[in-house]
Amino acid sequence: MSALADRKCVPCSGGVPRLRGEEIERYRTELRDWEVVDEHHLQKRFKFDNFREALAFVNRVGDLAEEEGHHPDICFGWGYAEIRIWTHAIDGLSESDFILAAKIDRL
Ligand SMILES: C[C@H](O)[C@H](O)[C@H]1CNC2=NC(N)=NC(=O)C2=N1
């Protein structure tokens, strides 16, 4: 199977099972330092040297999210951006969340 970052997020309108346990772990090993919180969402804090760089990163993530049709929650400020990703329709994790996270790592 191709690397997560080379795949495409797929729209999810529900009806698919949430990823759990070992499935989540398997996907997580393909990511760099993302935390899985309560088997519900992915979370990672990125650090920067100033506000401008954090803002530029957030804008690049925004462009990527629009391309993929999959959108993270982002909280950012001076020197940091914290990203959370999950699949709203199932209120949990699907493959697309890991694909988006891998693409963010590749930015
Ligand atoms: C209709 C559209 O595909 C959905 O609303 C998308 C938009 N972006 C999304 N982004 C994320 N992170 N999770 C979602 O479930 C999601 N749903």
Image: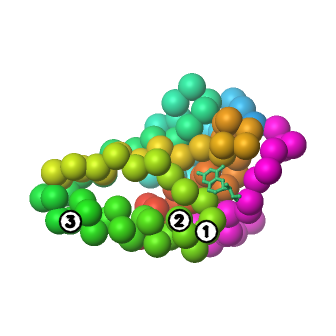
Q: Does the image show residue 22?
A: no
Residue 51 image point, x, y percent: 16, 58
Residue labelled 2 has its Cβ within 8 Å of some atom of ligand 1: yes
User: Which stretch is magenta?
Assistant: 1-17
Q: Is residue 40 above or below residue 5?
A: above
Q: Answer left or right for 83 relative to 80.
A: right
The quarter holding residue 21 reads top right
Image mark for residue 91: none
**Predominant secondary structure in magenta?**
loop
* Callout 2–callout 1 Cβ contact below 8 Å: yes
Q: Is residue 33 above or below residue 58?
A: above
Q: Answer left or right for 42 relative to 76.
A: right
* Callout 3–callout 2 Cβ contact below 8 Å: no
- Please state which amino acid type lies under the numbered disc 3: Glu
Q: Dot 3 corresponds to which residue?
A: 53
Mark 3 crowd level (few <14, some 14–19, many ≥20, 10 Å Cα): some
Q: Dot 2 corresponds to which residue?
A: 65
Residue 107 image point, x, y percent: 41, 70
